[in-house]
Image (spheres, helix red, strand yellow):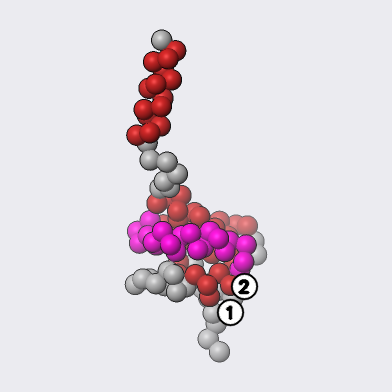
Amino acid sequence: MRHLAVALLAVFAAWTPACTQSITEDAFSVCRPLCRCTDRPLPGAQQSCTAGCATQFVQNPLGDACVACVVEHANLCDTLLEDCGPVCTQAVPLESYVEGPAPGMEDG
Protein backbone atom coordinates (compact mmCIF):
# COMPACT_ATOMS: atom_id res chain seq x y z
CA MET A 1 0.00 0.00 0.00
CA ARG A 2 2.86 2.34 0.80
CA HIS A 3 4.35 1.84 -2.68
CA LEU A 4 1.01 2.74 -4.23
CA ALA A 5 0.89 6.00 -2.27
CA VAL A 6 4.44 6.90 -3.35
CA ALA A 7 3.60 6.06 -6.97
CA LEU A 8 0.47 8.23 -6.86
CA LEU A 9 2.46 11.13 -5.42
CA ALA A 10 5.06 10.76 -8.17
CA VAL A 11 2.36 10.77 -10.85
CA PHE A 12 0.68 13.80 -9.29
CA ALA A 13 4.00 15.66 -9.02
CA ALA A 14 4.77 14.94 -12.68
CA TRP A 15 1.29 16.06 -13.72
CA THR A 16 1.32 19.28 -11.69
CA PRO A 17 3.17 22.16 -13.39
CA ALA A 18 6.33 22.90 -11.44
CA CYS A 19 7.21 26.40 -10.29
CA THR A 20 4.36 28.10 -12.12
CA GLN A 21 3.11 31.16 -10.35
CA SER A 22 -0.40 32.46 -10.42
CA ILE A 23 -1.22 35.94 -11.67
CA THR A 24 -1.78 36.99 -8.06
CA GLU A 25 1.68 35.76 -7.06
CA ASP A 26 3.23 37.56 -10.03
CA ALA A 27 1.29 40.70 -9.09
CA PHE A 28 2.77 40.79 -5.60
CA SER A 29 6.25 39.88 -6.93
CA VAL A 30 6.08 42.99 -9.13
CA CYS A 31 4.04 45.36 -6.98
CA ARG A 32 5.94 45.02 -3.71
CA PRO A 33 9.25 46.22 -5.19
CA LEU A 34 7.56 48.91 -7.28
CA CYS A 35 5.73 50.34 -4.30
CA ARG A 36 8.75 50.03 -2.01
CA CYS A 37 10.93 51.82 -4.56
CA THR A 38 8.56 54.74 -4.96
CA ASP A 39 8.38 57.56 -2.44
CA ARG A 40 6.24 55.73 0.14
CA PRO A 41 8.19 55.58 3.40
CA LEU A 42 5.34 54.38 5.63
CA PRO A 43 4.39 50.68 5.69
CA GLY A 44 0.67 51.50 5.45
CA ALA A 45 1.22 53.54 2.30
CA GLN A 46 3.32 50.74 0.80
CA GLN A 47 0.60 48.18 1.59
CA SER A 48 -2.10 50.38 0.06
CA CYS A 49 0.05 50.94 -3.03
CA THR A 50 0.74 47.21 -3.35
CA ALA A 51 -2.96 46.34 -3.08
CA GLY A 52 -3.92 48.88 -5.78
CA CYS A 53 -1.06 47.82 -8.02
CA ALA A 54 -1.94 44.13 -7.62
CA THR A 55 -5.55 44.83 -8.61
CA GLN A 56 -4.38 46.64 -11.73
CA PHE A 57 -1.85 43.88 -12.50
CA VAL A 58 -4.51 41.14 -12.32
CA GLN A 59 -6.66 43.14 -14.76
CA ASN A 60 -3.72 43.83 -17.10
CA PRO A 61 -0.85 41.39 -16.34
CA LEU A 62 2.71 42.10 -17.36
CA GLY A 63 4.70 39.54 -19.35
CA ASP A 64 6.97 36.90 -17.84
CA ALA A 65 10.15 38.72 -18.91
CA CYS A 66 8.95 41.89 -17.20
CA VAL A 67 8.06 40.04 -13.99
CA ALA A 68 11.48 38.37 -13.99
CA CYS A 69 13.23 41.70 -14.52
CA VAL A 70 11.37 43.40 -11.65
CA VAL A 71 12.06 40.45 -9.34
CA GLU A 72 15.77 40.59 -10.27
CA HIS A 73 15.83 44.35 -9.60
CA ALA A 74 13.75 44.21 -6.41
CA ASN A 75 16.66 45.56 -4.35
CA LEU A 76 17.90 47.98 -7.01
CA CYS A 77 15.42 50.83 -6.74
CA ASP A 78 17.70 53.31 -8.52
CA THR A 79 17.67 51.30 -11.74
CA LEU A 80 14.45 49.27 -11.57
CA LEU A 81 12.33 51.46 -13.86
CA GLU A 82 15.23 52.31 -16.16
CA ASP A 83 16.33 48.70 -16.64
CA CYS A 84 12.91 47.03 -16.66
CA GLY A 85 10.94 49.68 -18.53
CA PRO A 86 12.08 48.50 -21.98
CA VAL A 87 11.42 44.84 -21.05
CA CYS A 88 7.96 45.76 -19.81
CA THR A 89 6.78 47.47 -23.00
CA GLN A 90 3.04 47.21 -23.40
CA ALA A 91 0.02 49.49 -23.56
CA VAL A 92 0.29 50.27 -19.81
CA PRO A 93 3.78 51.50 -18.81
CA LEU A 94 5.40 49.89 -15.77
CA GLU A 95 5.43 53.08 -13.71
CA SER A 96 1.66 53.48 -14.10
CA TYR A 97 1.08 50.44 -11.87
CA VAL A 98 1.84 52.66 -8.86
CA GLU A 99 0.10 55.91 -8.02
CA GLY A 100 2.11 59.10 -8.35
CA PRO A 101 5.54 59.63 -9.81
CA ALA A 102 8.38 57.29 -8.99
CA PRO A 103 11.69 58.81 -7.91
CA GLY A 104 13.46 60.22 -10.92
CA MET A 105 10.26 60.18 -12.99
CA GLU A 106 9.15 63.73 -12.18
CA ASP A 107 8.72 66.24 -14.97
CA GLY A 108 11.55 68.66 -14.98
Q: Is residue 70 shown in magenta?
A: yes
Judging depth in this view, the residue of 56 and 72 nearest the camera is 72
Select label 1 or label 2 by which is in front: 2
Looking at the rendering, the stretch of residues picked out in magenta corresponds to 58-77
Task: In this rendered view, identify the residue nearer to me: 10 or 32.
Answer: 10
Mark 1 or mark 2: name the one nearer the start of the chain.
2
Q: Which residue is mark 2?
A: 78
User: Which SS does the magenta portion mostly show?
Assistant: helix
With respect to residue 15, does 31 lie above or below? below
Which residue sits furthest bottom?
108
Q: Position of residue 94 (x, y in %)?
A: 45, 69
Q: Position of residue 47 (x, y in %)?
A: 55, 56
Label 1, label 2: how many angstroms apart (C-alpha)?
Answer: 8 Å
Tell me if I can see residue 60 in this picture. Answer: yes
**Mark 1–mark 2 contact, CB under 8 Å?**
yes
What amino acid is labelled 1 in the image? Gly
76 is within the stretch colored magenta: yes
Residue depicted at 62% across the width and 66% down the height: 76
Residue 40, picture quadrant: bottom right
State the residue lying farthest toward the right.
41
x and y, in percent, of residue 23 in the image: 40, 51
Question: The C terminus is located in which quarter?
Answer: bottom right
Label 1 secondary element: loop
Q: Which residue is rendered at x = 45% and y = 55% of the image? A: 27
Horizontally, residue 54 falls left or right of residue 78, namely: left
Q: Report whether residue 99 is seen.
A: no
> Which class describes the residues within 10 Å of circle 2: few (<14), some (14-19), or many (20+)?
few
Q: Which residue is mark 1?
A: 104
Locate residue 33: give its quadrant.
Answer: bottom right
- How packed mark 1 is, by other alpha carbons closer than 10 Å (few <14, some 14-19, many 20 or more), is few
